Amino acid sequence: MKQSKYKGWLYLLPAIIFLGVFMVYPLIDVIVYSFEEGYNFVSQTSTGTGLYNYRYVLHDTYFVQALKNTFVLVIITVPVSTGLALLISLALSSVKPLRNLFQTVYFLPYVTNTLAVGLVFMVLFKKTEYSDGMINLLIHFFGGSTVDFIDGPHWAKMLVMCIYTVWIVLPFKILILTSALASVKEDYYRAARVDGTRPSRIFFRITLPMISPMIFYLIITGFIGAFKAYSDEVALFGTDLNSAGMNTMVGYIYDMLYGNSGGYPSFASAAALILFAVVFTITCINLMVSRNNVHY
Amino acid sequence: MKIKLDHVTKRFPNRNKKIREDVIAVNDFTFDIPDGKLIGLLGPSGCGKSTTLNLISGLEMPTAGRIYFGDTDVTDLPAENRGVGLGFQHYALYPHLTVLDNITFPLGNLRGAEKLTKEQMRAKAMEVAKLVQISELMERRPSELSGGQQQRVAIARALVKMPSVLLLDEPLSNLDARLRLQTREELARIQKETGITTIFVTHDQEEAMSISDLIVVMKDGVIHQIGKPQEVYDKPCNLFVAKFLGTPPINVFEGTLKKGTLYIGDEAVLDVKLTENDASDDKKAKAKQADSDRTVWVGIRPEGFVPDAEGPLSCSLSKIEVMGRDTSVVSTHPAFVGTTIRSIIPSEDAAGIEGETVRFRLKPAKVCLFDHETEETIPFEAR
Ligand SMILES: Nc1ncnc2c1ncn2[C@@H]1O[C@H](COP(=O)(O)OP(=O)(O)OP(=O)(O)O)[C@@H](O)[C@H]1O
Ligand SMILES: [Mg+2]
């Protein structure tokens, strides 16, 4: 018995070493950094320990901006993309002919290169010397005036950002939800039909609870993904996100480390831990809410 | 409610592209189900029983033919509007709902004047739950129930809205012998009390015989016989029905009709007079031919054998099984189709049976004759 206990650990050893070196140690290091005040990157010395880094970051207008942007992005894109994906999947599973074609079309963005997607968005939204972009053409058509989506007002940029994010995450969610819908046994619907159940009641009392684990999964991963958003912002607005006012939390952390204004691992660490705390809290709330509403 | 099927046929397209033929699950069904009766739909696996129920419930649309409830043609009415109660073969209980919520689910669909409060629904659910003995399981999820318990929940759910037509697909298949007996009595009682026209599917002939007012015997999508259980048992219309009903099954011999006498092997067992009165020339010719030699199948119910030292049929005795009230005599005979003849006799008559052979006299009412080719019944009278 005793021997087999050691054996178990032995088998786990490679994984533990790997996780220790690449996950646990950096994590601890980040925590340590975040409390070291006046850390000098070159001499690797600090002037003391305390909460100064946190205080600095929380008072930094760029950080506050990034925090706001991230929250707006999360709060808008997660529900919208999940809801939209659900609608599209429902529509997909109710059409018989051409279903495969539609499924492929909806899945295309997932296998498309991010840069190509960015290019498409440029065509849609960017104002150039030659054109105001497709969306502006539409706005003109309905009698509106030109909006500069890429270098214009903050709300316009946020709008583009949200649409972009929703568009990027949609295919995966549709894929997950269509297979979840397909896995609900036909017999339940037949039973409900015989009992004269209205379609809305079938949806809310049968379909939704049956696919709730998958929806829950999508919401959790959606939240986490949106909190970690960064590269999509760069693709649309370039690397100087702070001056564009479009930075996100991860973007801020990155800039603190490597950006033009970078070289502050202590501030970056503090910001990273704040992000961690936020994501952790949200996930806990999600789990608590799900306990009553998700049926496995 | 009276149900009438009028030449109803259901074909399923065959998925196998090589075989172009459709699967005919239900072939030209025509029958009337009187109001307020309990009907047993009986047949071997895959004969189209579930499909028949689905057609009546509206879940499947017939390829041809019409279906009537009372005097209304419901053929084109979708399942939602037919208002039947259907208990599924595989229960189809909603896994995320408790037993109580499962049972009240159909009630939640009622609108307008029929709308019920939560308490009313609960009361109704408790009532039917008591009928099927699941009152103490109301807070559980289906996954926490045994197969038999799930089955009873399914019956309760089909019953709770007191539909005018109740369809149950193998409602008792998963119950143990005792509970099965009990539940089937219960089912018959509920049906009598409520007067709901009920069709239930089973492949257990005993179950169908014991509680049904009418049984429908089908095979390969075709109805073979409809009638009162005793009638179908005593006067099966063909060899299949005769074999399908009764435990132990009917004993089938190869026999010959010679000048009004029925021979099994070369023993004259019964004097018969054929009463075939079909108008068709074909049949007449056959009847005539019957006066000369005619090979037939002879079916004898186990209870049709009377031990008699002078009896005409001699079988070689294999063993005697005493089963309390009755005794089962197992024997063999060269003309017998199959391996062993099983006859059931009252235990007090079994005293004299011993040795190598046993001789029987036959009760004419328990003997059926079937045409050798068509396997249709040949009506006859004993002389
Ligand atoms: N959706 C379908 N598509 C194609 N064939 C089908 C379909 N449903 C049933 N069948 C065929 O129709 C025939 C009758 O099926 P059905 O389910 O009615 O049998 P059953 O009498 O209920 O059998 P069991 O006692 O095994 O439940 C079978 O041969 C089956 O393969
Ligand atoms: Mg079936």
Image (spheres, coloured by chain):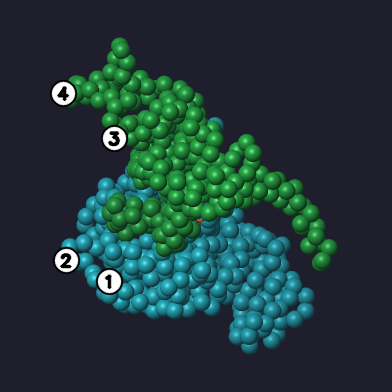
Chain colours: A green, B cyan
What SS does tag 3 mark?
A: helix
Circle number at residue A143:
4
The answer to whether the residues at label 4 and label 2 have Cβ atoms under 8 Å apart is no
- Please rate how many residues cluster around mark 2, counting C-alpha atoms within 10 Å: few if below 14, some from 14 to 19, many from 20: few
**Nearer to us in this view, B182 or B359:** B182
Q: CA distance from mark 3 to mark 4?
A: 20 Å
Q: Is circle 4 on the same chain as circle 2?
A: no
The residue that label 1 is drawn on is B118
Above-or-below relation of B165 to A198: below
The residue that label 3 is drawn on is A155
Q: Extreme front residue here?
A: A47
**Nearer to us in this view, A16 or B139:** A16
Residue B298, given in percent of the width and then of the height, sits at 58, 62
Q: CA distance from mark 2 to mark 3?
A: 51 Å
- Please rate how many residues cluster around mark 3, counting C-alpha atoms within 10 Å: few if below 14, some from 14 to 19, many from 20: few
Q: Which of the two labelled residues, at mark 3 and mark 4, occupies the earlier sequence position? A: 4
Circle number at residue B113:
2
State the residue at coordinates (21%, 62%).
B111
